[in-house]
Amino acid sequence: MQIKTLYGLKQASRCCNKYFGEFLSEVRFKTSEADPCLYIRDKYEKKSIVCLYVDDGLVAATDLKESEKSIDDLNSKFKITTKQAN
């Protein structure tokens, strides 16, 4: 595993996505078959979705607690900032 990727290199986003995907697998997200940047966790009739685009992400869930759990999982490994939609 590459510890650090250099911003601006062609392979940087691929390396980051691979690292991010491995972490999401650890917290029970599955990669979508339709799009490798879309991750889904289905648990107890509740669904969470994480979508990545370069260095931005979107978290959506069927309820607020599931959304907060997904954000807490991400925050445990990565330095993230959040902005909640109205």
Image (spheres, rainbow, N blue to C red):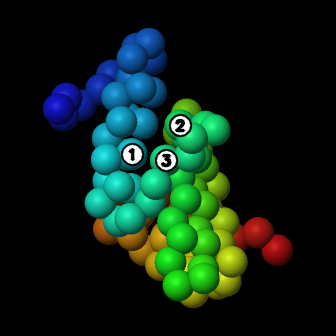
Are the residues tagged 3 and 2 within 8 Å (C-beta)? Answer: yes
Can you say whether 24 is above or below 21 in the image?
Answer: below
Direction from residue 22 to residue 65 in the image, left or right = right
Direction from residue 76 to residue 68 in the image, left or right = right
Q: For marks 3 and 2, give the CA distance.
A: 6 Å
| The C terminus sits in image quarter | bottom right
Q: Which numbered disc flags the more N-terminal residue, 3 or 2?
A: 3
Residue under numbered circle 3: 31
Residue depicted at x 39% and y 17%: 11
Residue depicted at x 51% and y 66%: 41
Instruction: Estimate the x, y position of residue 72 in percent, counting from the top left.
Output: 42, 74
Camera-nearest residue between 64 and 80 = 64
Q: For marks 3 and 1, give the CA distance.
A: 8 Å
Of tags 3 and 1, which is closer to the observer? 3
Q: Amino acid at mark 1?
A: Gly
Q: Dividing the picture into quarters, in which one does residue 16 lie? A: top left
Circle 3 packing at 10 Å, graded few (<14), some (14-19), many (20+), is many
Are the residues tagged 2 and 1 within 8 Å (C-beta)? Answer: yes
Residue under numbered circle 2: 36
Q: Amino acid at mark 2?
A: Pro
Residue depicted at x 60% and y 72%: 47
Can you say whether 82 is above or below 37 in the image?
Answer: below
Report helix, strand or loop for mark 2. loop
| The N terminus sits in image quarter | top left
Numbered tag placed on residue 21 in the rendering: 1
